[in-house]
Amino acid sequence: MQNLAALSALSFVVASTAHGQLFSEPFDDSAADVTIIQQPDSVATFVNYANMTVGTTNFNIPEAPRQIPGSASTRGLLLQSNLSVGIASASNVLAGATPIAFSGDYTLSFDVYMSVAIPIPSGSTEQMLWGVGVDGNDTVEARNTRAAGAAGTWGWLANENGYGTEDAAIFEDGTELADLGDTQLGESDPFNAAFTNNIGGPNNVPVNSWVRTDIVVSGGNVSVLYNGVEFFSEMSSSTDGFAMLGYEDPFSSVSSSPDFQWGLFDNFVVTPTPSTLAPAMLVSIGLLRRRRTQ
């Protein structure tokens, strides 16, 4: 797990510089090269998150951890769901204003910040979404409706571990491959390894901090890493198609602190998969070692 995490982190740098990117979007402004699919009562806003106002509340969020070179600082995409109507709602964001189909081995990466009021209010459980090989249809909710018919390999990470058993999940088409939650953890606890915030539950949660997300497609396997920690590694044959990020509230309850309920996204990148870069990386590491010993 640690080797894969290190490989993923290193591949992001190597692919961005030496091998080029398949897709790159910093969300600097509304001209972003993406397709946004939304349900009613969901909002997508391009923001300067160093000084942004949501409702009547001001937020000052630090720069995301993997700023795309040459992009504007502290610019990102703010997604909100189920603001007032009281129905589950979601937004999906596909790579490309004309969605781009990716195939073979590739890695989807982005940074996400999920906000929650502290202490945790009623109606607070929401989640960010990711997907590879999706078909871009209008079935955008993950927990409620995507499993009924949407293609691809996809999943979610809940903001404050409110589910207990499915705080992180991975699906292939309509079949759940694996999930993790507070009440399931045994010897291995990726939540405490990946995240540092604790809000009184048994495990750390991703709320109110940046989370580096990497979905690594390699040789028919999909690995899901949050902050370099592997949560899932599952075989899937549904990875050719569009790359996606998103946000949803899967419940009908409206948060009692709606200003604090949102997901902020930055640095949406698709690169060649780490496995295709491994030989080049090994050569580079070898050269560095030789230089240090000379």
Image: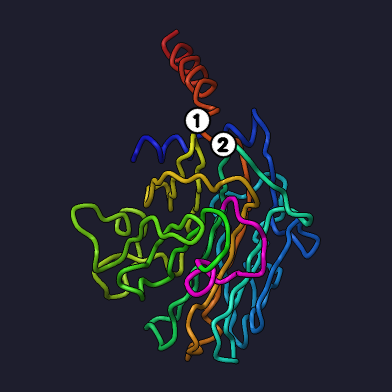
Would you name the residue on which mark 1 appears?
Answer: 275
Q: Amino acid at mark 2?
A: Asp
In the rendered image, the quadrant that contains the N terminus is top left
State how far apart marks 1 and 2 are (Cα). Answer: 8 Å
Q: Residue at x 40, y 81 (%)?
A: 118
Examine the residues drawn in magenta and state their main secondary structure: loop
Q: Residues within 10 Å of mark 2 (few under 14, many from 20)?
A: many
Look at the image and give the residue range highlighted in magenta: 132-147
Query: Where in the figure is residue 43, as x and y percent of width and height?
Result: 67, 77
Q: Is residue 136 magenta?
A: yes
Q: Is residue 21 magenta?
A: no
Would you name the residue on which mark 2 appears?
Answer: 105
In this picture, residue 109 sits left or right of residue 165: right
Query: Where in the figure is residue 32, as x and y percent of width and height?
Result: 76, 58
Q: Quadrant of residue 191?
A: bottom left
Q: Residues within 10 Å of mark 1 (few under 14, many from 20)?
A: many
